[in-house]
Amino acid sequence: MKKNSVLLVILAFLIVVFTLNAQDRTLRFERQHVTINDFDADGYILAIGGGGEGTIGRLKGSQVIAIDMSKRELEEAPEGPLKIIYVIV
């Protein structure tokens, strides 16, 4: 599977999680440890849930658009990416 396909699968999963949370449902998972190595990418990268550790933002800096539901998470994330707060109305 190509890296772009893996990123699309992760993106689809995160969109589903955001949608479920919008309906007042909570999903709980055991802690996962994932290693993300630097990767080549052209253009911008949308990091859904990009607050908190800001892993993709730290790897790719100003190439990243980080979106998160938590203003606090985005404020705590490292500088570099464009940060957008995702609000459900």
Image (cartoon, rainbow, N blue to C red):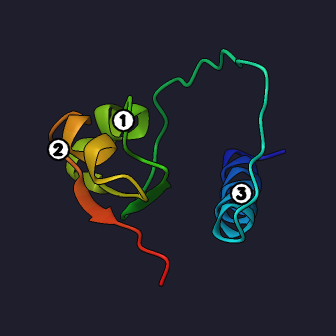
Earlier along the polypeptide chain: callout 2 or callout 1? Answer: 1
Query: Which residue is more in the foreground, 18 or 3?
Result: 18
* Alpha carbon separation for disc pair 2 and 1: 10 Å
Earlier along the polypeptide chain: callout 1 or callout 3? Answer: 3
Q: Element at badge 1? A: loop
The residue at which mark 3 appears reads as 17
Residue 43: where, in percent of width, then height?
A: 36, 64
CB contact under 8 Å: marks 3 and 2: no
Which mark, residue 54? 1
Which mark, residue 70? none
Q: Element at badge 2? A: loop
Q: Amino acid at mark 1?
A: Gly
The residue at which mark 2 appears reads as 80
Residue 32 vs 23, above or below: the answer is above
* Alpha carbon separation for disc pair 3 and 2: 25 Å
Dot 3 crowding, Cα within 10 Å, few <14, some 14–19, many 20+: some
Residue 12: where, in percent of width, then height?
A: 73, 62
